[in-house]
Image: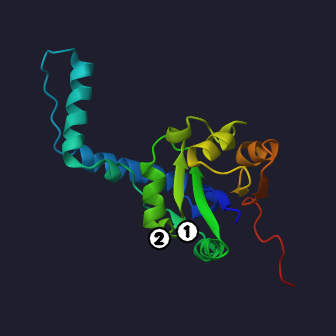
Amino acid sequence: MVERFLFISLECLVRYPTQEKRTENKEKHWKSLSEGFRFGKTGSGGPEKDFIEQISQYISNRISDIDLFDATGFSPYEESTSVLKELNEAGFKVIVISDSSLKLRPLKVLRSTGLEQHTHSLITFSEVLQKKSSLEYFKTVKNLLGLKENSEIWVVANKVHKEILSAAKSGIKHIWVNQLVNDIVKPI
């Protein structure tokens, strides 16, 4: 039996918050993290080094790694859950791909939106050490996952210049999700 895999970009599953909302969340998060912090010179390595060491220690004592990333404002597209369920029922293993350097943020987004339960794996830059636009990206991912040569593989993405071009040049079937066009067909 042929194994079926669908690599899908995180951006095709969730709506990202606006830039203003991300900036607001970052400022709010930083304010709450730094509240109560008092810098004191220790003389061990200069003021900059002392500050970085002290703020790092202060923050690490207050939060866990997973809390560093705020998933507020991310929401799944209306059809994301049902499409993922249908893909699973059709025998596809859904692999979410992200150029994020840390796995924590996309993982937290998948968890907070309820989509994690419908996916089989999450692959980030930190595991393949290549961006999705690299011509070697999908070859590296296939090797990392131990996929067989006869596996059926599809790539679903919203960036032609990244995943779609890389998949096409690698001979992988691909679907471009054009999220720039609203209401392609309007009812009369």
Q: Nearer the viewer, residue 131 or 188?
A: 131
Q: Residue at x 57, y 63 (%)?
A: 14
Q: Is residue 27 left or right of residue 88?
A: left
Q: Residue at x 68, y 41 (%)?
A: 139
Q: Is residue 73 visible?
A: no
Q: Residue at x 60, y 62 (%)?
A: 94
Q: Which residue is mark 1?
A: 76
Q: Nearer the viewer, residue 26 or 15?
A: 15
Q: Are marks 2 and 1 in contact (CB under 8 Å)?
A: yes
The type of residue carrying mark 1 is: Pro
Q: Position of residue 57 (x, y in %)?
A: 20, 35
Q: Where is the N terminus found, in terms of image quarters?
A: bottom right
Would you call the spot at circle 2 few (<14 residues within 10 Å), some (14-19), or many (20 or more)? Answer: few
Q: Position of residue 27 (x, y in %)?
A: 37, 47
Q: Position of residue 179 (x, y in %)?
A: 72, 60
Q: Which residue is mark 2?
A: 114
Mark 2 residue element? loop
